[in-house]
Image (cartoon, grey):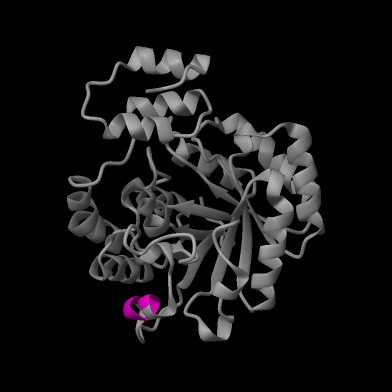
Amino acid sequence: MFRAKIKVLDCTVRDGGLINKWQFSDDFVRKIFMALSRAGVDYMEIGYKSSEKYFSRGEHGAWKFCTEDDLKKIVGNFDTKMKLSAMADIGRIDFDDIPSKKDSALDMIRVACYAHEVDKGINLAHHCMEKGYEVTINLMAVSKVLEKDLDEALEDLAKSQVQVIYLVDSFGAMYSEQIHFLAKKYFKALPGKELGMHAHNNQQLAFANSIEAIIAGINCIDATLYGMGRGAGNCPLELLLNFLKNPKFDIRPILEIIQESLIPMKEEVEWGYHIPYMITGILNEHPRSGMKMMASKKLPNLKQFYEDLRDGTPLD
């Protein structure tokens, strides 16, 4: 499906880092950066912009923080049209930790917030805009939000200066019908703004739901190399680029980096579709319990896990 306005953001390092606490080598991140640039991807989300006041470098890798020194090691003087993004979570970054755009290798900051804290998200987003960045707000876990609360959040976002708002299926719980319904709701509530889509693959629907978002008119789409991301992962970039039929994209560098770096990494760090993640998805629950089960050396009792999660029984 060709539509020139569609922009693709790869968040392999940022979302994939949720698996291994962003313990990626500079060489790994640099190879991804080069491959995405050669493939014509519009944005690379290289990690989180977080404060070292709240997180330890002893526990988390460089891409939890995205300091300018670390960014320069990757970008160097490489000439590319691709833009760099980082995500900022409410309550995990101080305003003073965000440099002016003129002093940063970053082009965009994506603010992640929940519906009940959208006022704080807008405040942080406006601060980043004042410093010269492109900005989005990613409204998280909307599959858990009551419609009245979502309507109020969208009303606040409509009044904001932020021009791109993301629909986020944080738990991989949504079906295409829900994506279509929410896209219509967002477009009606947010006239004049662009929408984005970030999907998770708990039910093996991340690609299908991204297609549904595109059909509904959403122009900013997230994806990751080989679907790498938290738990069940995300929409695979290699599938998305082929679907878009835009001649600016070249899938060959993507296939090369997957073979060279992602396939070997998957032997060490696990992600992708597994039954525990499917269960959290169909029950519209955070995948942390599925991740805990996957990390356990015990043989999981899937039926018991499903019943306990469904019934709200505390999990061991």
Q: Can residue 204 be seen here?
A: no
Instruction: Provide residue 103's location: percent of width, then percent of height.
Output: 52, 85
Asked whether, in this view, residue 222 is left or right of residue 100, the answer is left
Instruction: Provide residue 254's location: percent of width, then percent of height.
Output: 30, 59
Query: Relative to 28, is 235 above or below?
Result: above
> What segment is highlighted magenta in the picture?
70-74
Q: Main secondary structure of the magenta part?
A: helix
Relative to the observer, which residue lies in front, 193 or 70? 70
Asked whether, in this view, residue 129 is left or right of residue 75, the answer is right
Residue at the location (26% across, 30% down)?
Answer: 296
Residue at the location (55% across, 32% down)?
Answer: 174
Reply yes or no: does residue 117 show up in magenta.
no
Query: Relative to 129, is 199 above or below?
Result: above
Residue at the location (50% across, 66% down)?
Answer: 51
Q: Can residue 226 be seen here?
A: yes
Q: Where on the picture, by quarter, is residue 159? A: bottom right
Instruction: Provide residue 279's location: percent of width, then percent of height.
Output: 42, 23
Relative to the observer, which residue lies in front, 278 or 288? 288
Residue at the location (50% across, 36% down)?
Answer: 171
Relative to the observer, which residue lies in front, 177 or 145? 145
Instruction: Provide residue 193's location: percent of width, then percent of height.
Output: 73, 58
State the quadrant of the C terminus.
Answer: top left
Relative to the observer, which residue lies in front, 269 or 67? 67
Query: Relative to 298, is 188 above or below?
Result: below
